[in-house]
Image: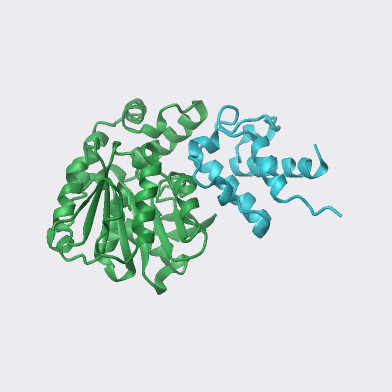
């Protein structure tokens, strides 16, 4: 994993923890393989909040709704943390010298 | 995500995209902004400004002890519109189920604020179509049974999600006036419906218990079109692609009166 991907993963995990904001999530191990549905049992509205918080963080560097567009909320909840990180990392890759 | 103060609580809301405004209202109990977010609001946001909010007692909004009647919920909608600065020019309004009843109530009160109206499986009157399923729910056990039986979105829910939904429903059913407010929801007056000059798209499921309401509204509303889709009441979950196609055709196609292009299943209103 590049440092850019590692940084993105850490940021996504932070947003998951702060959005869920319940005691158990603070100690729950989250990595690339963690699934929003099977492992975290997120509610669909929680996924929406995480996506919106990430969009706000990145501003115009990211168009998360374009990526989500047309997918059902069940498909989104079925994603892994790594799926989301890969999309964001690719979209926000720093320009190479 | 923004919070908007309303009578007795606050509502969670968001706005996506740029362009002519569309406000979307979800249904009772299992509905929230996620009903619309990825399947509808995201694609529509390519050429619209889409405003979503969690209605009182739902999603990330608070659970006020009262105010689930249509008057107060239409007031809530007004607060959302004012917050997002949509009061300057007419916008489109889309509602599913209870959200459709709120949308229709708002439309009758402020027709000049709207461009077009979409009612998705509006169960009017709610005292007849919604209340019977709520009436027998007197305990947490009965609530769990109600949720399994009536709420398609509960199916397949794991432990945490199910528990969170039941906690919210518990507050709505037993610590708020929701049930009595729904029991008191009558049909809108026929004269008001007959005078509503807006283009209205009615979308109903062929297997929905509410289909007769759609046929009735088609007769009463002067500029209505009815699209029947192959599904039941939970159209946003059961037939998302067909609903999106009907919405896009209606919202993008036009200011035209005739909506012949809407969907192959559409039935034009009789003159």
What sort of colour scheme is used for the picture? by chain
Residue name at image x 52 percent, y 29 percent = B160
Which sits in the foreground, B174 or B228?
A: B228
Image quadrant in which the C terminus of chain B is located = bottom left
Name the spot of residue B241 as percent of width and height, x first. Answer: 40, 43
Name the spot of residue B31 as percent of width and height, x first. Answer: 40, 43
Chain for colour green = B
In this view, the residue farthest toward the right is: A97
Chain for colour cyan = A
Which sits in the foreground, B133 or B184?
A: B133
Residue B69 in sight: no
Residue B234 occupies which quadrant of the picture?
A: top left
Name the spot of residue B252 as percent of width and height, x first. Answer: 39, 60
Residue B87 in sight: yes
Image quadrant in which the N terminus of chain B is located = bottom right
In this view, the residue farthest toward the bottom is: B88
Name the spot of residue A67 as percent of width and height, x first. Answer: 58, 47
Which sits in the foreground, B186 or A86?
A: A86
């Amino acid at each position: 994993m590049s440092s850019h991907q590692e940084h993105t993963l850490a940021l996504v995990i932070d947003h998951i923890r702060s959005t869920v904001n319940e005691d158990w999530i603070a100690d729950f191990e989250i990595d690339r393989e963690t699934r929003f549905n099977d492992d975290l049992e997120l509610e669909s509205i929680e996924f929406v909040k995480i996506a919106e918080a990430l969009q706000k963080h990145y501003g115009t560097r990211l168009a998360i709704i374009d990526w989500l567009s047309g997918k059902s909320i069940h498909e989104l909840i079925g994603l892994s943390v790594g799926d989301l990180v890969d999309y964001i990392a690719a979209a926000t890759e720093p320009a190479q010298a | 995500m923004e919070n908007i103060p309303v009578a007795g609580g606050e509502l969670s809301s968001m706005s996506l995209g740029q362009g002519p405004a569309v406000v979307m209202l979800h249904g009772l109990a299992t509905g929230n902004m996620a009903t619309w977010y990825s399947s509808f609001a995201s694609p529509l946001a390519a050429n619209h400004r889409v405003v979503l909010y969690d209605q009182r007692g739902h999603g990330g909004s608070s659970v006020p002890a009262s105010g689930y009647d249509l008057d107060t919920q239409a007031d809530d909608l007004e607060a959302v519109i004012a917050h997002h600065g949509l009061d300057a020019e007419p916008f489109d309004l889309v509602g599913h189920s209870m959200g459709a009843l709120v949308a229709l109530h708002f439309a009758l009160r402020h027709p000049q604020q709207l461009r077009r109206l979409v009612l998705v499986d509006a169960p009017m009157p709610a005292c007849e179509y919604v209340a019977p399923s709520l009436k027998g729910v007197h305990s947490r056990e009965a609530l769990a049974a109600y949720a399994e039986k009536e709420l398609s979105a509960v199916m397949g829910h794991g432990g945490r999600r199910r528990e969170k939904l039941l906690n919210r429903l518990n507050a709505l059913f037993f610590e708020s006036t929701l049930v009595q407010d729904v029991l008191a929801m009558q049909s809108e007056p026929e004269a008001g419906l007959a005078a509503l000059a807006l283009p209205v798209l009615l979308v109903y499921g062929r297997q929905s218990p509410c289909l007769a309401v759609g046929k009735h509204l088609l007769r009463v509303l002067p500029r209505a079109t009815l699209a029947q889709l192959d599904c039941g009441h939970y159209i946003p979950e059961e037939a998302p692609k067909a609903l999106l196609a009907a919405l896009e055709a209606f919202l993008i196609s036009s200011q035209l009166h005739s909506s012949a292009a809407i969907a192959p299943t559409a039935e034009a209103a009789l003159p």
